[in-house]
Amino acid sequence: MKRVHHDLDDATLRFNLWLTQVVVIGVALIGSLFVHGWADTLSLFRFPGIGSLMWAIGVAAVVVGSSIGMDRFLPPRWQDDGSINERIFSGLSIGGTFVLCCVIGIGEEWLFRGVVQPVIGNVWTSVLFTLVHVRYLSKPLLVGCVFVTSWLLGWLMETSGSLLPSILAHIVIDLLLAFYIQHGYSRERRNLE
């Protein structure tokens, strides 16, 4: 199967990511109003307490630590997604990276944890979340990592009753791994092999 993303320049790839996130947020908004109504949609974003946010930071630390460990100690071919993440994040400023990671975290968590999970549960939402990340499907290690990460994000939502912990964890995960990519640590290892 031909990988279309190789034919796209980095700016077009980023544009498509932004466009996708606008669609995700639009679907999340409409879906949330349909599933929950206005008042309950707002309550999804209630402050859950410091303890829940600390759990979110802990989950993010475990996911990021595991990802960096796998990048450092496992063969790169097990994790290569076609260098899409490198292409997306390498050309962004720190501010652009922060904004992009926030938009992705808010949109995806609102859609998957706020709209889909209450209807089909955490396990099936995690399966769907994994399938949506289609570029990882040919790499069993990445499929497992995306599924476990999604399940943990869903667990944060279930235990807190708020989207804020899963949003925070998602943003921290994406942001730290984007900075890891931007500083060349991931590429540095691939170039050694």
Image (tube, helix red, strand yellow):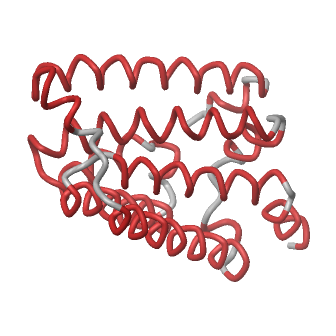
Q: Nearer the viewer, residue 161 or 78?
A: 161
What x and y, as percent, mark residue 27? 30, 20
Q: Residue at x 50, y 62 (%)?
A: 142
Q: Residue at x 55, y 57 (%)?
A: 173
- Classify residue 107 by image quadrant: top left
Total labels: the figure holds 0
Q: Is residue 92 above or below residue 159?
A: above
Q: Residue at x 31, y 59 (%)?
A: 49
Q: Is residue 28 left or right of residue 90?
A: left
Q: Nearer the viewer, residue 159 or 68?
A: 159
Q: Is residue 190 left or right of residue 84?
A: right
What x and y, as percent, mark residue 59? 44, 69
Q: Is residue 68 above or below residue 53?
A: below
Q: Is residue 174 left or right of residue 27?
A: right
Q: Is residue 150 left or right of residue 71?
A: left
Q: Is residue 116 above or below residue 48?
A: above
Q: Residue at x 67, y 40 (%)?
A: 98
What x and y, as percent, mark residue 149? 40, 62
Q: Nearer the viewer, residue 68 or 33?
A: 33
- Classify residue 159 by image quadrant: bottom left
What x and y, as percent, mark residue 174? 58, 51
Q: Quadrant of the N terminus?
A: top right
Q: Quadrant of the C terminus?
A: bottom right
